[in-house]
């Protein structure tokens, strides 16, 4: 009897450890909530492609800690309600090990309580207005502290601008970025002589353009909702014949290029541009081209942080030696990866990353000229208590 | 001076965008909620033509053809069975608008498309430099309203149309083919819509939802102005100017709401709005 009991215990132990191994060998699931429908669906395909490439590369190189990586994509409908559903389904139904993705600020704020409840690491990969903090969240996109300064500095030093006019769409990102920009202009000794907003879906900038004209600022800075409002503003500024230097905080390289002459002279600042001359960026673009061919969506300042983010997670899991949420969160702040944008490391307390920022200007033929590179720009205090 | 030009060009844009809706509402008593989507068709017609290297004139011609085709098909398949049920027609055209927009999304994607403007930059008028394309909208709107006025008041078609507007049964009993009049008016309304879409595209962005932003204002303007193009022109001038005044001197966010608020107030005080009689 004693012998039987002993062998039973041994067998149980053996079984348990075997089961434990089997579980450890299961795939690591990465949840990506993204706007496959709605306003973000213009940008979403590039984000999905970047995720697919990262996962394919990681799996080809043996996975994370020997485990395969699996991508779970959920449509968030580009809005807060859709994001709640997407996060719910990723965290509680698909039981993902981590959520990595971009969201609008409203959607991110709506989803954060779900992340806290589900206790999974969340890597937020979008640029945004700053100061969003959560125990489970790390952020590798830029905040206004990193972006505005480069544009304002250039306008003040090179274009000798003293007076500024700020134009935006009336929502968290537009207001947040311009609020910081205004502060920064004042600190630097400039004056803001006008600040105007249109509703988020507003396209008719007529009255605001007349105000800009009559106040005749040295420079113009805008931060509108992406797509239609931004494009209309650019076109209407050009057709009104306004020719002061113009910094656009919310434009991406692809849109600026396709606007062509309407965007010529426009300044923008970003943590990624496709023409970066680094081996990592060239390898990344070549891999994208090889995998997606003519269907490749131009990588941008949302899709590349997504790619970085997946590698950051890999590094954190490897450092922690486990995909357990608490351990990954602790390790995430101690790792760094070298990606297309350069070395990315997120501060464990401040939860944001120092980034290389690139100030670019659109030329008349639609090509892009990098005016200045700012290395290792700090995000400033974001989540420091 | 710039302020005056802002008022005038805003009114001209409003008139262009609203006239198609007005044409359909005037004759049929149906609010065509697909009007926003029809503006989108016009924008995309202009995009298709210019993207293939044709001039803006071809864009306008293509928009005209697209409007004619869309108007004819929609009238026969969707609107005609619902003449006697105007409330159902609102629902049907609303749904139709969603369908058209989704078809545009399937064909061209959700992204913003770009059209090269036929007239670039600004020009000097009366001592101020002003957007040349916006100025170009002034004669276009004036010409359109003159043509519509002549069509409705000086032609046989116009007389018949006005007869149908005033008393359809009586007109029909006098041998006027009211069904044909309705069909032609709907097509004309759709054509005005697509042309407006093509005309505004160089100033705004071309995307599947481009017309939606205009729908509320156009609807309000039509409600206030009744059935006459003269009163529509007057309404556009007054409300367009009001919008510019509020946007310039108070706040552009409030400016966006001006037309809706003014229209509601006007209708509350005078239920006939700006229409005579």
Image (spheres, grey):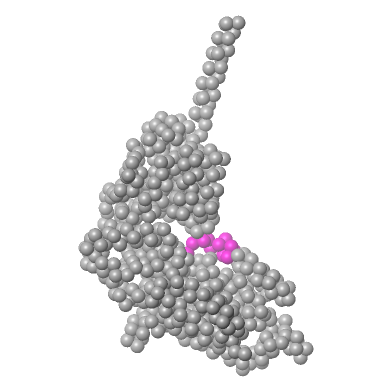
Place of residue B192 in the rendered image (x, y in percent of width and height, measured from the top left) = 57, 79
Residue at 42% x, 79% y: name it.
Answer: B245
Quadrant containing the C terminus of chain B in the rendered view: bottom right
Front one among A16 and A382 = A382
Q: Count the marks.
A: 0
Given residues A198 and B172, the one toward you in this image is A198
Among the 4 quarters of the image, the one containing residue A154: bottom left
Task: Reply above or below: A260 against A63.
Answer: below
**Quadrant including the N terminus of chain B:** bottom left
- Where is residue B125 shown, x and y percent of the image? 36, 86
x then y, percent, for residue B149: 58, 90
Assess whether residue B105 is covered by the magenta stretch: yes
Does any portion of residue A8 appear in the rendered image?
yes
In the image, the segment drawn in magenta is B101-116
Residue at position x 38%, y 82% from top? B3
Asked if one can make out residue A151 in the rendered structure from this viewpoint, the answer is no
The residue shown at (38%, 38%) is A332
Establish if A34 lies above or below B6.
Answer: above
Horizontal arrangement in the rendering, residue B101 relative to residue A370 (left or right)? right
Residue A314 found in image quarter: top left
Where's residue B237, x and y in %? Answer: 48, 84
């Amino acid at each position: 009897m004693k012998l039987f009991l002993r062998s039973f215990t041994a067998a149980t132990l053996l079984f348990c450890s075997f089961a434990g191994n089997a579980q450890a060998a299961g795939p690591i699931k990465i949840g990506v909530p993204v706007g496959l429908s709605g306003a973000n669906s213009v940008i979403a395909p590039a984000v999905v492609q970047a995720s697919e490439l990262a996962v394919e590369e990681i799996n080809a190189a043996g996975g994370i800690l020997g485990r395969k990586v699996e991508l779970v994509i959920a449509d968030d409908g580009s809005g807060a309600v859709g994001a709640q559903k997407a996060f719910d389904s990723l965290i509680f139904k698909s039981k993902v090990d981590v959520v990595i993705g971009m969201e609008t600020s409203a959607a991110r704020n709506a989803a954060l309580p779900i992340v806290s409840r589900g206790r999974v690491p969340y890597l937020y990969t979008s640029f945004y207005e700053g100061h969003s903090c959560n125990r489970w969240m790390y952020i590798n996109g830029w905040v206004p502290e990193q972006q505005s300064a480069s544009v304002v500095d250039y306008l003040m030093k090179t274009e000798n601008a003293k007076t500024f006019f700020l134009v935006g769409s009336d929502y968290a990102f537009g207001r947040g970025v311009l609020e910081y920009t205004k502060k920064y202009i004042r600190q630097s000794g400039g004056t803001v002589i006008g600040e105007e907003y249109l509703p988020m879906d507003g396209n008719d900038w007529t009255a605001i353009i007349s105000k800009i004209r009559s106040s005749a600022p040295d420079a113009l800075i805008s931060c509108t909702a992406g797509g239609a409002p931004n494009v209309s503003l650019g076109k209407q500024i050009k057709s009104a014949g306004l020719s002061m230097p113009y910094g656009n905080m919310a434009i991406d390289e692809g849109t600026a290029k396709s606007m062509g002459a309407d965007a010529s002279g426009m300044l923008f600042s970003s943590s990624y541009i496709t023409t970066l001359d680094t081996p990592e960026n060239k390898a990344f673009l070549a891999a994208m081209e090889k995998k997606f061919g003519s269907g490749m969506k131009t990588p941008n300042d949302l899709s590349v942080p997504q790619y970085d983010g997946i590698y950051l997670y890999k590094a954190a899991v490897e450092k922690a030696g486990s995909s357990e949420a608490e351990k990954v969160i602790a390790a995430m702040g101690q790792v760094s990866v070298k990606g297309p944008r350069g070395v990315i490391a997120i501060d464990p307390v401040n939860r944001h990353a120092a980034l290389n920022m690139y100030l670019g200007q659109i030329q008349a033929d639609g090509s892009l000229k990098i005016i200045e590179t700012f290395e290792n720009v700090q995000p400033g205090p974001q989540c420091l208590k | 001076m710039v302020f005056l030009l802002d008022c005038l060009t805003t009114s001209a844009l409003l008139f262009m965008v609203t006239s198609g809706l007005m044409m359909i509402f005037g004759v049929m008593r149906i609010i065509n909620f697909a009007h926003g989507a029809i503006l989108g068709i016009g924008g995309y017609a202009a995009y298709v033509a210019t993207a293939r290297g044709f001039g803006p004139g071809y864009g306008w011609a293509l928009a005209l053809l697209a409007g004619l085709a869309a108007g004819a098909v929609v009238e026969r398949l969707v609107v005609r069975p619902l003449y006697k049920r105007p409330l159902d027609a609102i629902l049907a055209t609303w749904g139709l608008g969603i369908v058209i927009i989704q078809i545009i999304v399937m064909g061209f994607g959700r992204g913003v498309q770009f059209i090269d403007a036929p007239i670039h930059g600004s020009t000097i008028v009366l001592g101020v430099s002003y957007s040349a394309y916006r100025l170009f909208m002034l004669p276009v709107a004036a010409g359109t309203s003159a043509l519509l006025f002549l069509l409705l008041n000086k032609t046989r078609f116009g007389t018949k149309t006005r007869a149908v507007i005033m008393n359809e049964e009586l007109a029909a009993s006098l041998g006027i083919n009211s069904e044909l009049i309705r069909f032609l008016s709907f097509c004309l309304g759709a054509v005005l819509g697509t042309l407006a879409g093509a005309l505004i595209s160089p100033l705004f962005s071309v995307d599947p939802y481009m017309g939606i932003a205009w729908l509320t204002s156009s609807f309000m303007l039509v409600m206030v102005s009744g059935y006459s193009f003269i009163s529509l022109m007057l309404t556009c001038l007054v409300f367009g100017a009001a919008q510019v005044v509020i946007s310039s001197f108070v706040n552009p966010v409030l400016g966006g709401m001006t037309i809706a608020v003014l229209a509601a107030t006007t209708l509350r005080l005078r239920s006939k709005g700006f229409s005579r009689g």
